[in-house]
Image: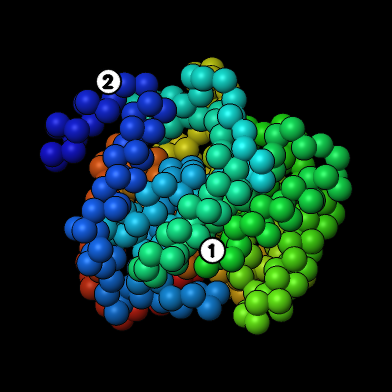
Amino acid sequence: MIYRRAVRPVLFSQDAETAHERTIALLASASNLPLHAGRSPFTHTKLASSIAGLKFPNPVGLAAGCDKNARAVRAWPHFGFGFVEVGTVTAQPQPGNPKPRVFRLVEHAALLNRLGFNSEGAEIVAKRLANLRRQRPLSVPLAVNIGKTKLVTGDDAILDDYRTSYRRLSRFADFVIVNVSSPNTPGLRQWQEKEKLGVLLRTLMEEARSLAAKRGVAPIPLFVKISPDMTDADMADIVEVALEVGLAGIVATNTTIAREGAMAAVEQTGGVSGAPLRERATEVIRFLHRATEGKLPLIGVGGIASAEDAYARMRAGASLIQLYTAMVYEGPFLARHINAGLLRLMQRDGVAHISEIVGR
């Protein structure tokens, strides 16, 4: 209530990207204060789970696109998040697309962005994460999302570009997510095609095994993030590739370029996140869960704004869920509220553990 009445009007009086950057800067500064040192993430025995060999205190994560350069990682568990995804990070620093490039669609409870992977680059982010790891252990699993540098062209160069990001960043991550689905980098989504995706994921899996062998540790789990704007046949191909190469899981979905129903009047180009994506993202998770026969963990993202949304996404097949856009509208403690709401829904339905509802 305080956020909606006092904080949100101030933020919404500013350009969307400016407000976001100022908020991240504030959280980055606050992350270094002693008050964060003893904070634990929201957890409960009924919500804690082990997925892809990692322990999650709760199933609600921060989605990519919020803390793109890993500046406020320690702040997020305080707000109730059970894991954090930073990025998308590119191998080389790049400014992204011209501004303005982020727009609030208030009447749709949505955001539209065409950021174009604005990133400080893998080297700078890796140094930041290395410093973070040296200070003290993180209280929740950390995912790093990697994507293609815009100016890199040619299949071999693009493969090397992804490999460079993985090599620089994976040692500081608990799991890595490969972004081949943003609509704002030219040519990126073609890497979702079966043959090209197979080559890319095999390349990164080989890199993961090689680096793990040198360090004497297990390979870092690898996920792929896909688009909502795909046919069932395309998604079936992705499932086949994911199972064949031994991926740890799939993240679904990225933003959408679809303009259906009330969104048809939106003329700005870019990817839409938030409420308009809810139904389609749920459909994609349901399809993937059936296609994988529940063999691959799925992370559901897109249009999740309440405990009911999270519950529905998990019943469709997601083991974990993520949010970002809804936090812009509902406030920073939304993850905490969703976790508390999940416990209430589980009690209502007589569910002993959150894993019991996945795919059911």
- Report the residue marked by disc 2: 13
Residue 22 at x, y percent in the picture: 33, 32
Relative depth, front residue between 320 and 128: 128
Q: Residues within 10 Å of mark 2 (few under 14, many from 20)?
A: few
From this view, report whether residue 297 is shown above or below residue 274: below
Cα–Cα span, label 1 and label 2: 37 Å
Q: Residue at x 60, y 49 (%)?
A: 123
> Splitting the image into 4 quarters, where does residue 25 fall?
top left
The amino acid type of the residue labelled 1 equals Phe
Relative depth, front residue between 99 and 93: 93
Give the foreground label among 1 and 2: 1
Say which element carries label 2: loop
Relative depth, front residue between 215 and 13: 215
Relative depth, front residue between 242 and 282: 242
From this view, report whether residue 332 is shown above or below residue 183: below
Looking at the image, residue 325 sits to the left or right of residue 143; the answer is left
From this view, report whether residue 297 is shown above or below residue 305: below
- Report the residue marked by disc 1: 172
Residue 119 at x, y percent in the picture: 56, 38
Q: Residue at x 83, y 45 (%)?
A: 157
Can you see residue 338? Answer: no
Picture colour scheme: rainbow
Q: Residues within 10 Å of mark 1 (few under 14, many from 20)?
A: many
